[in-house]
Image (cartoon, rainbow, N blue to C red):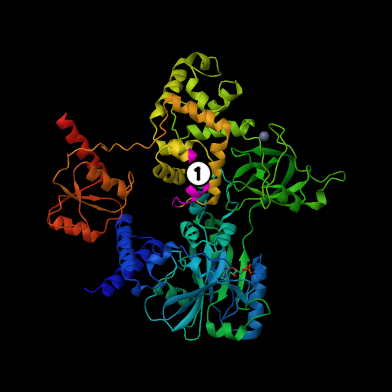
């Protein structure tokens, strides 16, 4: 088969797998196999740039940077929707329609109203051409590069489609993906996003499309528009869109009367809470295009469609006080303490106020009666003040100027939403938070020690930083509240055991701002030990894959701090792992003499070059391609299936990097 054919076959195959996974939700191959195929395609495309295609599945990983989003006119205007809040309003709407159309019997399409950012995507000859945000309805921003990274949007559609048409859909961030993003942010000491909708719409305007690719965005389609569409109604349109490869939610339903519309509304008013994404209502559309044409548009919206907004669960209650929490990184979060009230099945006592701007915008004052709402987020929020109940003597809320925990004057960086307590090394919640992070499961994983005990140890003056943990004795801990002999012993044992935690986890545990798990791994792998990392310059750091200015500066700041240097020196003395553990035999031996190795794929323990060097240092040879002379293939992640095939045909043993390490060590032992 010629190269071009192979490339096209792979693209079609990968498109289909993407569709199975992201639209149908039923993958039929493993992630590993998918990645291998993608890698294979990527390699072929690299070798044959003449077959480049901007809509190849390889383009979904992003990488294109958009400095300024170009403003482009919409071919078809993007209208708003009229809103309604009651069934009476819907009845009135139907009456207005019947005035225009006469007493015809009407069918409606009922769809959920997805809460995200709207997008219009133009397809030409079945290929995604351009994606534009709604903007003011007449023109929007060209965000094509970013949109292409969303896997449920087909880059190439299938079936019988007109030469050109637009699709309209909502870009959303499902709850699960949103929570995961927030977990990752919290882990590196950043503030979480406040809600899925703003995060979704903010994502569309990120400059680096590779960043967008990392976000679990989705696109739910609700409309097609064009000149030669092969259908005559909204419901058929959705069906056709599905066949072409789009994700048009199956919840959409045809209603044969307003009664059936009400049933749909009543059902989803309750069941929407079980959906994986946020919805804020139902959109009702006259089904027939013929009637839609007759009805036309007002200045702002179609006469043939209307949104019915669900009442969000809301209660009024009194704001008793505002307290200010200090996070691990010093960020201040204001919290509203409310008169306890029942809301959506739980008792609510507190609500998030986000930051100073939010308080100012809502003009929230202590003693006010406020409306509290539960949206998609877990913590309820205050949406407004009931002015009619404001006490006469109330005073505007003054945001605190000093840290409530250590009295240090707060700072607020330019363009930052939150105030910070800059007393990084003296502010109790920051110190406790850092130690809690240090002992956490993904960091030093210290058994026998929990977050509350850390606070207890700190409050009793037993630890001031994480290095102090290693000096703790059973005798010191025993007098603490609820501490028995056994648990005290376990604590000390758990701390000692953490000395064997690998370097990359230690690096994460240190709690350097912006250094999450993945970044810690990258740094550990690149610098191999803490001293090299400590001496790295800014220029040096940004050269490491995926390390940007912000992370690099944060690493520099961390190691420049005198206190941190002392702590690290102490940890070193206690025997914490400060270098990467490469169990490979780096001494020159002749263990592998006469053996030819082929190295393929990506490895986790070493770089490919290190692996090759290790083979040669131990007397082996590195071959460039698999042949009958090859003795071993060392396979990493993403090794191409073609290579695997060849190896198995030639009966060459395929080994992992661990096998390779064992190979050297075993031979070593045998020789001893
Ligand atoms: P609004 O922004 O309140 O005027 O509502 C109109 C917006 O609702 C549209 O621009 C779409 O982005 C969004 N929307 C969400 N779901 C749907 C749907 N099923 N049909 C039409 N529009 C929808
Ligand atoms: Zn403080």
Quadrant of the picture in which ligand 2 is shown: top right
Q: How many marks?
A: 1
Is disc 1's CB within 8 Å of ligand 2?
no
Region rendered in magenta: 534-545
Q: Position of residue 458 (x, y in %)?
A: 58, 24
Q: Nearer the viewer, residue 313 or 410?
A: 410
Q: Write the residue at 65% across / 73% down.
A: 136
Q: Position of residue 231 (x, y in %)?
A: 46, 82
Instruction: Work out whether 259 lies above or below 274.
Output: below
Q: Quadrant of residue 82?
A: bottom right
Q: Write the residue at 46% across / 15% down.
A: 485
Q: Position of residue 413 (x, y in %)?
A: 68, 48
Q: If the image is split into quadrants, where does the C terminus sit?
A: top left
Q: Write the residue at 41% across / 36% down.
A: 503
In the rendered image, residue 202 lying in the magenta stretch gets the answer no
In the rendered image, residue 540 lying in the magenta stretch gets the answer yes
The secondary element bearing badge 1 is classed as loop
Name the residue carrying label 1.
Answer: 515
Q: Visible in this render: residue 102?
A: no
Instruction: Work out whether 248 lies above or below 579.
Output: below
Q: Nearer the viewer, residue 48 or 451?
A: 48
Q: Quadrant of residue 490?
A: top left
């Amino acid at each position: 088969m010629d190269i071009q054919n192979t490339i096209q076959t792979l693209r079609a195959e990968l498109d289909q797998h993407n569709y199975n996974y992201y639209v149908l939700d039923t993958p039929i191959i493993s992630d590993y196999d998918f990645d291998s195929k993608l890698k294979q395609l990527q390699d072929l495309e690299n070798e044959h740039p003449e077959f480049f295609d901007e809509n190849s599945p390889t383009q979904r990983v992003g990488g294109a940077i958009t400095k300024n989003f170009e403003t482009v006119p919409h071919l078809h205007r993007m209208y708003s929707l009229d809103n309604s809040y009651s069934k009476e309003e819907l009845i009135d709407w139907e009456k207005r329609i019947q005035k225009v159309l006469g007493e015809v019997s009407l069918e409606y399409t009922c769809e959920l109203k997805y809460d995200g950012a709207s997008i219009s995507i133009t397809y030409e000859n079945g290929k995604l051409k351009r994606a534009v945000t709604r903007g003011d309805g007449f023109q929007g921003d060209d965000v094509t590069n970013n949109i292409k990274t969303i896997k449920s949007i087909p880059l190439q559609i299938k079936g019988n489609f007109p030469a050109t048409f637009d699709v309209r859909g909502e870009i959303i961030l499902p709850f699960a993906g949103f929570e995961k993003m927030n977990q990752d942010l919290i882990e590196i000491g950043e503030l979480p996003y406040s809600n899925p909708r703003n995060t979704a719409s903010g994502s569309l305007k990120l400059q680096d499309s590779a960043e967008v690719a990392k976000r679990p965005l989705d696109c739910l389609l609700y409309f097609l528009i064009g000149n030669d569409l092969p259908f005559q109604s909204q419901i058929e349109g959705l069906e056709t869109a599905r066949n072409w490869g789009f994700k048009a939610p199956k919840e959409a339903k045809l209603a044969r009367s307003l009664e059936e519309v009400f049933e749909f509304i009543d059902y989803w008013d309750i069941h929407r809470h079980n959906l994986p994404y946020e919805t804020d209502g139902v959109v009702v559309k006259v089904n027939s295009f013929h009637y839609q044409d007759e009805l036309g548009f007002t200045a702002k919206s179609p006469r043939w469609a209307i949104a019915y907004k669900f009442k969000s669960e809301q209660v009024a209650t009194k704001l008793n006080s505002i307290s200010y929490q200090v996070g691990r990184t010093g960020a201040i979060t204001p919290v509203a303490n409310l008169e306890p009230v029942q809301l959506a099945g739980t008792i609510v006592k507190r609500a998030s106020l986000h930051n100073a701007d939010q308080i100012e915008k809502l003009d929230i004052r202590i003693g006010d009666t406020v409306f509290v709402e539960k949206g998609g987020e877990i913590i309820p929020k205050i949406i407004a003040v009931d002015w009619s109940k404001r006490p006469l003597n109330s005073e505007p809320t003054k945001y605190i100027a000093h840290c409530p925990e250590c009295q240090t004057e707060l700072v607020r960086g330019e363009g930052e939403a939150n105030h910070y307590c800059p007393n990084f090394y003296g502010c109790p919640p920051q110190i406790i938070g850092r130690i809690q992070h240090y002992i956490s499961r993904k960091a030093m994983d210290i058994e026998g020690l929990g977050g509350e005990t850390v606070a207890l140890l700190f409050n009793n003056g037993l630890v001031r930083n994480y290095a102090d943990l290693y000096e703790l004795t059973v005798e010191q801990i025993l007098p603490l509240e609820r501490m028995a002999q056994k648990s005290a012993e376990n604590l000390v044992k758990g701390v000692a055991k953490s000395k064997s935690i690998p370097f990359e986890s230690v690096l994460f545990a240190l709690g350097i701002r912006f250094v999450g798990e993945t970044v810690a791994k990258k740094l550990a792998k690149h610098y191999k030990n803490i001293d090299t990392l400590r001496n790295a310059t800014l220029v040096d750091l940004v050269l490491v894959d995926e390390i940007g200015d912000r992370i690099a500066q944060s690493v520099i700041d961390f190691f420049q701090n005198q206190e941190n240097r002392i702590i690290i020196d102490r940890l070193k003395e206690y025997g914490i792992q400060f270098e990467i553990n490469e169990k490979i035999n780096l001494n020159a031996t002749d263990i592998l003499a006469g053996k030819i190795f082929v190295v393929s794929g990506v490895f986790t323990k070493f770089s490919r070059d290190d692996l090759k060097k290790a083979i040669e240092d131990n007397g082996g040879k590195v071959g460039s391609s698999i042949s009958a002379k090859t003795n071993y293939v060392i396979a990493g992640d993403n090794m191409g299936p073609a290579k695997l095939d060849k190896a198995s045909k030639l009966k060459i043993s395929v080994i992992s990097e661990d096998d390779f390490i064992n190979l050297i060590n075993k031979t070593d032992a045998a020789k001893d």
